[in-house]
Image (spheres, rainbow, N blue to C red):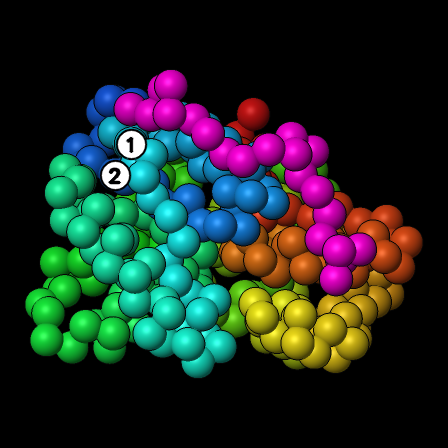
Amino acid sequence: MASRLPLSKKNKRFILFKEKKQRQEFKVKVSLYVPCIINHLMPESAYSIINIFKKCGIDFSVEEKQLCCGQPGYNMGFCEHSKPFARKFIDLYKSVDCDYIVVPSGSCAAMIKHNYPKLFPDEDLKWLEGRVVEFNRFIYENKLYLKLDLKYKGAIFYHKSCHLLNEMQIDREPKEMLGSIKGLRLFESESHQNTCCGFGGAFSAAFDNISIDIGISKLEFVIDNKINNIVAGDAGCIMHLKGVAAARGYKLNFYYIADFLDLCSN
């Protein structure tokens, strides 16, 4: 498993609390929740999100006491074990002054919006469901990507992430944001865009051979079509595909969508 988890270039957790507030012209307050994968394995993606927020003039903050949303245990059937994490998340954000809790992860956003009410059925969590929004949807629905003057010369393959698509119903949003980038050629193939990358969280650890084979199939399709760049709307997919490519010696570029939008706006 270790060979499939490439270390971040920064090789450190995301800690940006020295400048955790940015007040500009956007008229809502945002609290950024940093998922575990981004925090521990892809901290540069958190900085990309922060850069986008700054460029768009978003009033944002990052809570120092945030922790795992509890999704791993819940997905493996240990619902009671995930309850303390959910409880701490709820109690923390109940006191945070913000209009939106932006979550850059389809699976974490789904955990919070859909599964927390199941863990605490006697508690009214409509306030939380209304405030939690996945990163792609937040940027798209508020048309913030139009403020970034996006440009890129080249072609990319966009991978549709399963949790974004199936649990959050986020489909056209990333695609339309990428399609708005000047000079970019978006390579499309519905048969491969809609197939899993093989990650699936704990699935990739429990069934690593199957997980790797699924990832190889996706990557070889991209290589066969002479595309060098892969963009995905979920960081977990990028982490997995990047690890599989490194183990196989494939020379490809991988971008979580926030990293790519930040790159194209420079």
Could you say which disc has been placed on residue 61 in the image?
1
The answer to whether residue 179 shows anywhere in this view is no
Count of marks, rendered view: 2
Q: Is residue 49 above or below residue 160?
A: above
Q: Horizontal and vertical percent for residue 70?
A: 39, 62
Label 2: which secondary element: strand
Residue positioned 86% across, 49% down in the render: 251
Residue 227 is situated, as x and y percent measured from the top left of the image, at 79, 55
Checking the image for residue 30, the label placed there is 2
Magenta region includes residue 96: no
Q: Nearer the viewer, residue 122 or 128?
A: 122
Residue drawn at the location 27% of the way across and 47% of the way down: 101
From which residue to which does the magenta span run? 1-21
Asked whether disc 1 touches disc 2, contact meaning CB atoms under 8 Å apart, the reply is yes
254 relative position to 56: left or right? right
How far apart marks 1 and 2 lie (CA) works out to: 6 Å
What amino acid is labelled 2 in the image? Val
Secondary structure under badge 1?
A: strand
Give the main secondary structure, helix, strand or loop, of the magenta stretch. loop
Name the residue at 63% across, 68% down.
Answer: 199
Comes first in the chain, label 1 or label 2 = 2
Observer-nearest residue: 208 or 150?
208
Q: Residue at x 75, y 62 (%)?
A: 1
Name the quadrant of the C terminus.
top right
Residue 197 figure quarter:
bottom right
Residue 73 to residue 46: above or below: below
Q: Is residue 237 visible?
A: yes
Q: Nearer the viewer, residue 257 or 101?
A: 101
Residue 135, compared with residue 31, is above or below; it is below
Residue 11 part of the magenta-drawn span: yes
